Amino acid sequence: MKNSSTTSGPKKVTTKVIAAMKKEKNRIACLTAYDYITARLLDQAGVDLILVGDSLGMVFQGHETTIPVTMDEMIYHAKVVVRAVDRAMVIVDMPFMSYQANDEEGFRNAGRIMKETGAGGVKFEGGERIANLVRMTVRAGIPVIGHLGLTPQSIHQFGGFTPRGVTPAEAKQIFKDAVALEKAGAFSIVLEKIPASLAEKITKSIKIPTIGIGAGMHCDGQVLVVSDILGLNEDFHPRFIRRYARLAETIRQGVSAYVKDVKEEKFPNKKESY
Ligand code: KIV
């Protein structure tokens, strides 16, 4: 079955719905959102999963990496997104150093996200290394998505944004990580910038859905950063992004027209006044 059924009806997306989508070969559509208006539009358009990604550090705050993002900032954006959404499941990224020091701290921070935002689950970067934390979190009733491959919180260790899992050793480790996340109870795994063949092997080997970003067409779902698909970020052109709109140009044109009207005293007119 193809995606059409996900956009009809008010059915709230839950972990059960996501699991069923893999079984039914119904692809999962995921996008990021960081604000109320965008989240509302995404939900109305039938997006299944909305990720309040720590990519907001780059997209919303203008940082070079996701590293500076804090728990308080994630909670602020997650609350705003949850308020906007009726159908999609909202997942919140655990920011850098909210779970790396020890499992107890990660567990408590995941609980804080759930209590303070009303989100449906959290996402951690890592595989075998975080398996115990995932187990503790899931045991407490918190749905978890794992994230493997080019995990942006390790960007300084990787030394750049090049694809991961290209060498046999790294591919083997990513595969083991995916199996460890499934065993630990994660309900889905994001696979970022890895070869399509590796993503296919993982997708076919585990029962939980994979969601790819730059990981080819065999994943059970796809995720992209919303500003990338809408053409708001004109300087970013990696090959895994497809642009579905050119909003940067639309916004510039609209704002220039407004500025011109104000300067030329054409706005407001009589009908626009009281
Ligand atoms: O932070 C983010 O937006 C993400 C996705 C791009 C997967 O982790």
Image (cartoon, rainbow, N blue to C red):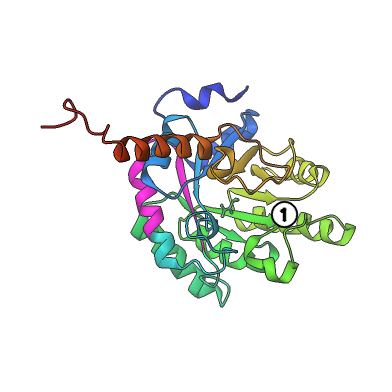
Amino acid type at image mark 1: Val
Query: Circle 1 is placed at which residue position?
Result: 179
Q: Is residue 63 visible?
A: yes
Q: Position of residue 267 (x, y in %)?
A: 26, 34
Which region shows up in magenta? 76-94
Q: Position of residue 98 (x, y in %)?
A: 51, 70
**What residue appears at the point 56 percent right and 77 percent down from the top-left corner?**
101
**What residue appears at the point 40 percent right and 39 percent down from the top-left corner?**
255
The quadrant in which the C terminus is found is top left
**What residue appears at the point 48 percent right and 34 percent down from the top-left corner?**
250
Q: Is residue 49 left or right of residue 169?
A: left
**What residue appears at the point 31 percent right and 40 percent down from the top-left corner?**
263
Q: Position of residue 194 (x, y in %)?
A: 77, 50
Does the magenta segment cover residue 77?
yes
The quadrant in which the N terminus is found is top right
Q: Against 105, is 123 above or below?
A: above
Q: Is residue 12 left or right of residue 235?
A: left
